[in-house]
Image (cartoon, rainbow, N blue to C red):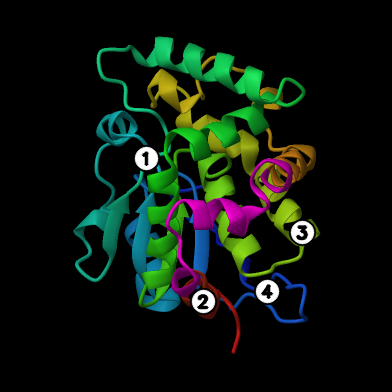
Amino acid sequence: MGWIELDGAANVRDVGGLPTDDGRHVAECRLLRGDNLRDLSPADVALLVTEIGLTAVIDLRSPEEAAASGPGPLTRVGAVRHARHSLLPELGDTSAADMTAVRLDRAYSRHPDDIRCGLYLGYLEERPDQVVAALRGIAEASGTAMVHCAAGKDRTGVVVALALTVASVRREAVIADYAASAERIDAVLARLRGSQPAAADIDGRPAEEQTPRAETMAAFLDQMDSRYGGVRGWLSRHGFRAADTAMLRARLLEA
């Protein structure tokens, strides 16, 4: 299906159709990925819920981001289950700006050649339980699942890349899906600037620093292989069992 044009979001698409290593494809309308869903119109909600069959929303934003944004219209749809799995460290007494500075410093230490790759590795190191829970949310959805964050490119990009890799989607297709958000980056940033706390890594940074690059996802997948023995190796260490893998694959792939 590809891009889903909505009035109230800029970076929503269906990953259906992506090819796997064994010649299969991801089924359409099983997994959507998106940005902030706060401003969806009634027509958007009808398209997602009635026509596409959305039944689960997996929100990767922090509590601070969600509070700043406010509830979106999908939260009022009883047929849609909502779960939040923040991939950012809890702020506690630390300001959002200070926490962002700490995260960037840690990211540089993890991967000095690609700081965004370092940030992505931080999601795995700092919130492994939330990453695993998000993947289980996709696997357990009765209909279409939507994974989203603020911009739909970094946290969403990582979780979707992990899910697609578990489903044996070809590496080049995983990378291309991640990089596709670059096509919508100007519209995404225009929606978000000034509306998110500093922890969202949006405000005050040029678009080129925010634009997804294929090289970043390639570096991330390389790091998964070298550090953890691959995506499945990391997941198994964090309680994602063989039965979870089978369920996720069955949910995502065409019969």
Number of residue marks: 4
Q: List the residue tagged with mark 1.
A: 86
In this rendering, the answer to whether 103 lies above or below 127 is: above
What amino acid type is highlighted by mark number 4? Answer: Gly
187 versus 98 height, above or below: below
Q: Residues within 10 Å of mark 1 (few under 14, many from 20)?
A: many
Q: In the rendered structure, which disc, 2 or 4, sits on the residue that comes first in sequence?
A: 4
Between residues 166 and 198, which one lies in front from this camera angle?
166
Q: Which of marks 3 and 2 is nearer the N terminus?
A: 3
Visible residue check, residue 76: yes
Magenta portion: prevailing SS class:
helix
Q: Nearer the viewer, mark 4 or mark 3?
A: 3
Q: Classify the position of the C terminus by image quarter.
A: bottom right
For marks 4 and 1, give the CA distance: 28 Å
Q: What stretch is highlighted in magenta?
A: 224-244
Q: Which marked residue is nearer to the observer: mark 3 or mark 2?
A: 2
Which disc is residue 105 wearing? none
Q: Is mark 1 on a helix, strand or loop?
A: loop
Looking at the image, is mark 2 or mark 1 nearer the viewer?
2
Q: In which quarter of the image is residue 65?
A: top left
Residue for badge 4? 17
Dot 3 amino acid type: Arg
Question: In the rendering, at what x and y percent does residue 212 appear?
Answer: 69, 38
Disc 3 target residue? 171
The 10 Å Cα crowd at callout 3, few under 14, some 14 to 19, many 20 or more, is some
Left or right of 84? Residue 193 is right
Residue 246 is labelled as: 2
Task: Give residue 39's position: percent from left, percent from top.
Answer: 36, 46
Left or right relative to 71: residue 250:
right
SS for dot 4: loop
Tell which circle, 2 or 1, labels the residue nearer the N-terminal end. 1
Tell me residue 82's x, y (percent).
28, 57
